[in-house]
Image (cartoon, rainbow, N blue to C red):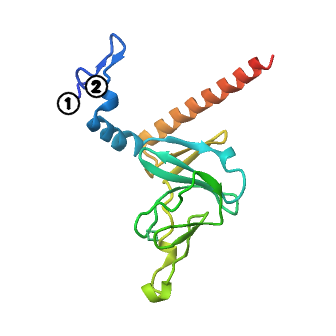
Amino acid sequence: MPTADSHGYRPGLVDLKAGQISREIFVNEAIYQEELERVFARAWLFVGHESQIPNPSDFAVSGMGEESVILCRDRAGEVHVFLNSCRHRGMKVCRYDEGNTAVFTCPYHGWSYGTDGRLVGVPFLREAYRSTLDRSQWGLVEVAQLARYKDLLAQNLVAGDCTYCSVHAGAWVLWSGFRCETRFLVGVDSSK
Ligand code: FES
Protein backbone atom coordinates (compact mmCIF):
# COMPACT_ATOMS: atom_id res chain seq x y z
CA MET A 1 0.00 0.00 0.00
CA PRO A 2 1.57 3.34 -1.04
CA THR A 3 2.12 5.86 1.73
CA ALA A 4 0.05 9.01 2.02
CA ASP A 5 1.04 12.23 0.25
CA SER A 6 1.39 15.60 1.97
CA HIS A 7 -2.42 16.05 2.04
CA GLY A 8 -2.88 12.73 3.79
CA TYR A 9 -4.27 11.01 0.70
CA ARG A 10 -2.69 7.97 -0.89
CA PRO A 11 -1.69 8.49 -4.53
CA GLY A 12 -4.24 7.18 -6.97
CA LEU A 13 -7.11 6.86 -4.51
CA VAL A 14 -8.40 10.42 -4.41
CA ASP A 15 -8.54 12.82 -7.35
CA LEU A 16 -9.22 16.18 -5.73
CA LYS A 17 -9.43 18.09 -9.01
CA ALA A 18 -11.99 15.78 -10.55
CA GLY A 19 -13.77 15.20 -7.24
CA GLN A 20 -13.46 11.46 -7.65
CA ILE A 21 -12.40 8.62 -5.37
CA SER A 22 -11.30 5.12 -6.20
CA ARG A 23 -13.63 2.20 -5.50
CA GLU A 24 -10.61 0.64 -3.81
CA ILE A 25 -11.48 2.77 -0.79
CA PHE A 26 -14.61 0.70 -0.17
CA VAL A 27 -13.07 -2.75 -0.51
CA ASN A 28 -9.47 -2.51 0.64
CA GLU A 29 -8.99 -4.44 3.89
CA ALA A 30 -5.96 -2.38 4.99
CA ILE A 31 -7.89 0.87 4.60
CA TYR A 32 -10.83 -0.59 6.51
CA GLN A 33 -8.59 -1.66 9.38
CA GLU A 34 -7.02 1.79 9.45
CA GLU A 35 -10.48 3.38 9.57
CA LEU A 36 -11.42 1.19 12.52
CA GLU A 37 -8.32 2.27 14.38
CA ARG A 38 -8.09 5.93 13.42
CA VAL A 39 -11.75 6.88 13.05
CA PHE A 40 -14.12 4.49 14.81
CA ALA A 41 -11.95 3.95 17.89
CA ARG A 42 -11.23 7.65 18.43
CA ALA A 43 -13.98 9.77 16.93
CA TRP A 44 -17.36 10.90 18.20
CA LEU A 45 -19.93 8.51 16.81
CA PHE A 46 -23.69 8.80 16.75
CA VAL A 47 -25.05 5.96 18.91
CA GLY A 48 -28.76 6.61 19.20
CA HIS A 49 -31.60 8.88 20.26
CA GLU A 50 -33.05 9.19 23.74
CA SER A 51 -36.53 8.38 22.37
CA GLN A 52 -35.28 4.82 21.83
CA ILE A 53 -35.05 4.35 25.61
CA PRO A 54 -37.83 6.51 27.10
CA ASN A 55 -38.42 4.46 30.27
CA PRO A 56 -36.21 3.23 33.10
CA SER A 57 -34.57 -0.13 32.22
CA ASP A 58 -35.13 0.37 28.46
CA PHE A 59 -32.19 -0.60 26.27
CA ALA A 60 -31.20 -0.65 22.61
CA VAL A 61 -28.13 -2.21 21.05
CA SER A 62 -26.06 -0.06 18.73
CA GLY A 63 -22.63 -0.28 17.14
CA MET A 64 -19.35 1.53 17.01
CA GLY A 65 -17.26 0.20 14.16
CA GLU A 66 -17.26 -3.51 14.87
CA GLU A 67 -17.95 -3.02 18.58
CA SER A 68 -21.42 -3.77 19.89
CA VAL A 69 -22.61 -1.31 22.53
CA ILE A 70 -25.65 -1.17 24.79
CA LEU A 71 -27.48 2.10 25.11
CA CYS A 72 -29.65 1.94 28.22
CA ARG A 73 -31.47 3.97 30.84
CA ASP A 74 -30.93 2.76 34.37
CA ARG A 75 -33.62 2.48 37.01
CA ALA A 76 -32.83 5.99 38.22
CA GLY A 77 -33.29 7.41 34.71
CA GLU A 78 -29.60 7.96 33.88
CA VAL A 79 -28.47 7.15 30.33
CA HIS A 80 -25.43 4.90 29.83
CA VAL A 81 -23.55 3.37 26.92
CA PHE A 82 -21.68 0.16 27.73
CA LEU A 83 -19.52 -2.16 25.68
CA ASN A 84 -21.64 -5.24 25.02
CA SER A 85 -18.98 -7.52 26.42
CA CYS A 86 -19.00 -9.62 29.56
CA ARG A 87 -16.16 -8.88 31.99
CA HIS A 88 -15.67 -12.60 32.55
CA ARG A 89 -14.79 -14.01 29.10
CA GLY A 90 -15.99 -11.35 26.71
CA MET A 91 -19.26 -12.89 25.56
CA LYS A 92 -22.01 -10.50 24.39
CA VAL A 93 -24.23 -9.99 27.42
CA CYS A 94 -27.16 -8.58 25.45
CA ARG A 95 -28.45 -10.66 22.53
CA TYR A 96 -31.54 -8.58 21.69
CA ASP A 97 -31.84 -5.42 19.60
CA GLU A 98 -34.02 -3.57 22.12
CA GLY A 99 -36.30 -4.09 25.07
CA ASN A 100 -36.70 -3.53 28.79
CA THR A 101 -34.87 -5.54 31.39
CA ALA A 102 -33.94 -5.57 35.05
CA VAL A 103 -30.55 -7.17 34.33
CA PHE A 104 -28.34 -8.27 31.45
CA THR A 105 -27.43 -11.90 32.04
CA CYS A 106 -24.51 -13.33 30.13
CA PRO A 107 -25.51 -16.57 28.38
CA TYR A 108 -22.09 -18.16 28.90
CA HIS A 109 -21.62 -18.50 32.68
CA GLY A 110 -24.47 -16.41 33.97
CA TRP A 111 -22.85 -13.25 35.27
CA SER A 112 -25.56 -10.58 35.58
CA TYR A 113 -25.28 -6.81 35.25
CA GLY A 114 -27.75 -4.10 36.30
CA THR A 115 -28.82 -1.41 33.86
CA ASP A 116 -26.34 0.89 35.60
CA GLY A 117 -23.57 -1.54 34.59
CA ARG A 118 -22.86 -2.94 38.05
CA LEU A 119 -22.08 -6.63 38.34
CA VAL A 120 -24.95 -7.86 40.49
CA GLY A 121 -24.84 -11.62 40.13
CA VAL A 122 -22.12 -14.28 39.87
CA PRO A 123 -23.17 -17.94 40.03
CA PHE A 124 -21.16 -20.01 42.53
CA LEU A 125 -19.50 -16.89 43.89
CA ARG A 126 -18.56 -18.63 47.13
CA GLU A 127 -17.54 -21.97 45.62
CA ALA A 128 -15.68 -20.72 42.53
CA TYR A 129 -14.13 -17.55 43.93
CA ARG A 130 -14.18 -18.26 47.67
CA SER A 131 -16.10 -14.98 47.94
CA THR A 132 -12.92 -13.04 47.09
CA LEU A 133 -14.21 -11.56 43.83
CA ASP A 134 -14.81 -7.83 44.31
CA ARG A 135 -17.92 -7.35 42.19
CA SER A 136 -17.58 -3.57 42.31
CA GLN A 137 -14.48 -3.88 40.09
CA TRP A 138 -16.10 -6.01 37.40
CA GLY A 139 -19.01 -3.99 36.04
CA LEU A 140 -19.65 -3.42 32.35
CA VAL A 141 -17.18 -1.05 30.70
CA GLU A 142 -18.80 2.32 30.03
CA VAL A 143 -17.69 4.47 27.10
CA ALA A 144 -15.27 7.18 28.13
CA GLN A 145 -17.39 10.08 26.95
CA LEU A 146 -21.06 10.54 26.14
CA ALA A 147 -22.39 13.70 24.51
CA ARG A 148 -26.03 14.76 24.28
CA TYR A 149 -27.47 17.27 21.87
CA LYS A 150 -31.22 17.62 21.38
CA ASP A 151 -31.68 14.05 22.60
CA LEU A 152 -29.11 12.78 20.12
CA LEU A 153 -26.40 10.71 21.79
CA ALA A 154 -22.81 10.39 20.67
CA GLN A 155 -20.04 8.39 22.26
CA ASN A 156 -16.29 8.43 22.25
CA LEU A 157 -14.01 5.71 23.57
CA VAL A 158 -11.19 8.16 24.13
CA ALA A 159 -11.07 9.69 27.59
CA GLY A 160 -9.83 13.16 28.39
CA ASP A 161 -10.19 16.58 26.93
CA CYS A 162 -7.74 16.59 24.04
CA THR A 163 -7.95 19.25 21.36
CA TYR A 164 -8.79 16.71 18.70
CA CYS A 165 -11.76 15.45 20.77
CA SER A 166 -13.00 18.96 21.48
CA VAL A 167 -12.77 20.04 17.87
CA HIS A 168 -14.41 16.86 16.68
CA ALA A 169 -17.16 17.09 19.32
CA GLY A 170 -17.83 20.67 18.27
CA ALA A 171 -18.06 19.60 14.66
CA TRP A 172 -20.44 16.81 15.61
CA VAL A 173 -22.69 19.20 17.55
CA LEU A 174 -22.76 21.65 14.63
CA TRP A 175 -23.54 18.88 12.18
CA SER A 176 -26.23 17.41 14.45
CA GLY A 177 -27.74 20.82 15.03
CA PHE A 178 -27.83 21.47 11.31
CA ARG A 179 -29.51 18.13 10.69
CA CYS A 180 -32.06 18.74 13.46
CA GLU A 181 -32.89 22.24 12.29
CA THR A 182 -33.07 21.08 8.68
CA ARG A 183 -35.46 18.29 9.58
CA PHE A 184 -37.53 20.70 11.66
CA LEU A 185 -37.77 23.20 8.82
CA VAL A 186 -38.62 20.49 6.32
CA GLY A 187 -41.38 19.35 8.67
CA VAL A 188 -42.82 22.86 8.90
CA ASP A 189 -42.74 23.29 5.13
CA SER A 190 -44.37 19.97 4.40
CA SER A 191 -47.28 20.69 6.75
CA LYS A 192 -48.41 23.71 4.71
S1 FES B 1 -18.34 -14.97 29.61
FE1 FES B 1 -19.99 -14.04 30.63
S2 FES B 1 -20.27 -15.20 32.39
FE2 FES B 1 -18.56 -16.10 31.46
What amino acid is found at the position of numbered circle 2 in the picture? Tyr
* Quadrant field for ligand 1: bottom left
Q: Is residue 166 above or below residue 57?
A: above
Q: Who is closer to the viewer here, 108 or 178?
A: 108
Task: State the count of labels.
Answer: 2
Kindly identify which residue carries mark 1.
3
Task: Where is residue 141? Give x, y as percent.
Answer: 48, 61
Crowdedness near tag 1: few (<14), some (14–19) or many (≥20) residues, C-alpha within 10 Å = few
Q: What x and y, as percent, mark residue 136?
A: 52, 74
Residue 22 visible somewhere in the drawing? yes
Residue 59 falls in image quadrant: bottom right
Q: Nearer the viewer, residue 185 or 174?
A: 185
For disc 2, the marked residue is 9
- Residue 1 vs residue 132: left or right? left
Give the Cα distance between marks 2 and 1.
Answer: 8 Å
Compared across the picture, whether 155 is left or right of 12 comes to right
Residue 69 percent coordinates (x, y): 51, 52
- Residue 179: % across, % down: 61, 28
| Amino acid type, label 1 | Thr
Q: Residue sitting at 27 percent across and 22 percent down?
A: 13
Q: Earlier in the sequence, mark 2 or mark 1?
A: 1
Q: Residue furthest left?
A: 2
* Residue at 54% in and 59% down: 94
Please identify the residue farthest to the top as the structure is shown. 18
Viewer-closest of 119 and 6: 119
